[in-house]
Amino acid sequence: MKSTGIIRRVDELGRVVIPIELRNQFNIVEKDPIEIYVEGSSIILKKFEPNCIFCGSNKNLLEYSDKLICKSCSEKIAELKLEEE
């Protein structure tokens, strides 16, 4: 991990402000969802990007039953359905 040299304090509600320089760098705007990961003793913040529930791709997504599926996986599922018939 690369240090930014920026330090922020946690407020009484547990919030931390992400500096504007980092928000600009990662194209994070107000109301954007942020994913929170834990890796060892580190907390990692990542801008949330919707992904295919099967392969994790974030390209050519289709919504089906409130789930996201990429076009490629959708085509593979359609092929499986045809094989069953």
Image: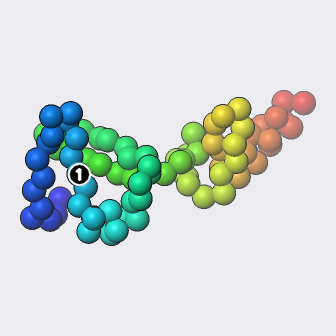
> Which residue is tagged 1?
17
Name the spot of residue 65 as percent of width and height, x first.
Answer: 71, 32
Q: Residue at x 72, y 37 (%)?
A: 64
Please name whichever residue, 60 or 10, is drawn nearer the observer in this view of the structure.
Answer: 10
Q: Would you identify the image quadrant in which residue 66 lies?
A: top right
Above or below, 66 against 55 in this view is above
Helix, strand or loop for disc 1 = loop
Residue at position x 15%, y 40% from top? Answer: 11
- Tag 1: amino acid: Val
Q: Quadrant of residue 38?
A: top left
Residue found at x 12% / y 52%: 8
Front-lying residue, 9 or 38? 9
* 13 sits left or right of 69 in the view: left
Q: Nearer the viewer, residue 59 or 13?
A: 13
Q: Is 6 positioned to the left or the right of 65 in the image?
A: left
Q: Position of residue 51 (x, y in %)?
A: 54, 47
Q: Is residue 13 above or below residue 52?
A: above
Q: Is residue 75 left or right of residue 45?
A: right
Q: Quick check: 50 above or below 84?
A: below
Quadrant into which the C terminus falls: top right
Q: Residue furthest right?
A: 85
Count of numbered circles in the view: 1
* Residue 60 appears anywhere in the view: yes
Q: Is residue 66 left or right of residue 83?
A: left
Residue 33: x %, y % from top left? 43, 46
Q: Residue at x 80, y 41 (%)?
A: 78
Q: Quadrant of the N terminus?
A: bottom left
Check disc 1: other Cα within 10 Å, few if <14, some if 14-19, many if 20+: few
Residue 56 appears at what percent x and percent y?
Answer: 52, 47
